[in-house]
Each structure stands twice: as structure tokens, then as C-alpha cells.
Amino acid sequence: MGGARVLVVHYSRTGNTRRVAGAIARALGADSEQIADRADRAGPLGYLRSALEAILGASTGIGPPGRDVAGYDLVVVGTPVWYASVSSPVRTWLRLVRRRLPEVAFFLTHGGMGAERVMSQMAALAGKRPAARLVVRRRDLASGADREKVEAFARSLARGLGAGRPRGSGRGRRRTKAPARLRRSARPPIR
């Protein structure tokens, strides 16, 4: 990686996002950290709690970050999609570290809809555009297609890091503000 320091941070309720995070960390030779959620998300009540927090755009209790993101050149952040929204542990983590984040890249895992919306939410929470994005569907995990996607994502990031900074990052630590339409809390229609 040409001496670039990379951190992969993720939250995983079911293990799918953890699996992808591990593959990305291995491919990039990166450090890895799982966000420690203090909420009980087991079983049907845990699922309902997660859905409600996603609908409301709520934060949740998490353990303190284990690593200082400011010591890295790139932080790759991963979340599962909850009700077409970023998971509340990742939302909380991004709010906590936003001002210290270097360049970022995002990935998510999901089984349904909402990938574009979640990527937009993550960019707004981080205050910057990602150098790269990766979307892994549940069927990709089942078929093994996730491996090819992770490899392509890692190659893209490695090329950007090899050039001295992630691709598309511009100069310095530019922060972008999400357009007003992305800051509003749009919810999927109830059917």
C-alpha cells in the first residue's frame, strides 16, 4: 500500500457485514475494528428495535472507538442496511468521529433496497464523499460473487492510495456538505 495506513470499521448484526469487512481488511492489509453496540439486538425484539432506530434516524449507545481515525490515511466504513437506512451503531460512530476522519470509503450489505440512500446518508454523516463505494447483496454472499466485488473495491482503493491519496479525494481535507435533499429524513413508503 505504499505506506498508507488504512482502517476498516464496521458494525454487523448478523455477521454478513463482518465477513465483508474482514475480506476488505485482508485485501488492503488494513487494521480492522468492529463497532461495539451496547443495545441488545437479538431475536425479534432486537430486530424491531433496529428497524425503529433506522426509521427515526436515531443514535444508539456504542463503546468508545478503539482506534484514533486521525492516525490513518483512509478509513473504510461498513454498515448493514436497516429499513433503507444506515444502521444506528454506524450512524452514532460517524457522528462521534466526523471531525477527525481522513479520506473515507464506504461499503454496505443488504438483502433488499436502499443502497443509494444509505450511501448518501453515510456521506452526509461523514461530511465528505467516499473515495470508493461497495454494495454487497445477500445473494452475492450466497453465490460467492462478493469476493470479486471486494477485490475490485480493494484494487480501486489501492490505486488511489498508491497515487498518494484515494482517488477522487481532491487536495487536502476538503469537507463536503450534503445537499438539502439528502439531509432530510425520507422514509420508504409503507405498503
Image (cartoon, grey):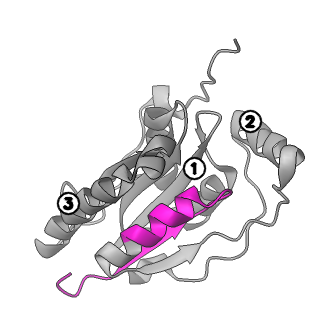
Q: Does the magenta run of residues contain 118?
A: no
On screen, residue 134 above or below 28: above
The residue drawn where x is 20% and y is 64% is 155
- Percent position (x, y) of residue 164? 15, 74
Q: Going by the image, does 133 lie left or right of 8?
A: left
Q: Which mark is residue 80?
A: 1
- Mark 3 or mark 2, earlier in chain: 2
- Percent position (x, y) of residue 68? 51, 82
Question: Residue at label 3?
Answer: 156
Q: Indicate the secondary structure of the residue bearing disc 3.
A: helix
Q: Quadrant of residue 116?
A: top left
Q: Indicate the secondary structure of the residue bearing disc 1.
A: strand
What residue occupies the far left of the structure in this picture?
163
What is the distance, in whole Å, between disc 3 and disc 1 at their CAs? Answer: 22 Å
Q: Nearer the viewer, mark 1 or mark 2?
A: 1
Q: Which mark is residue 177?
A: none
What residue occupies the far front of the structure in this picture?
143
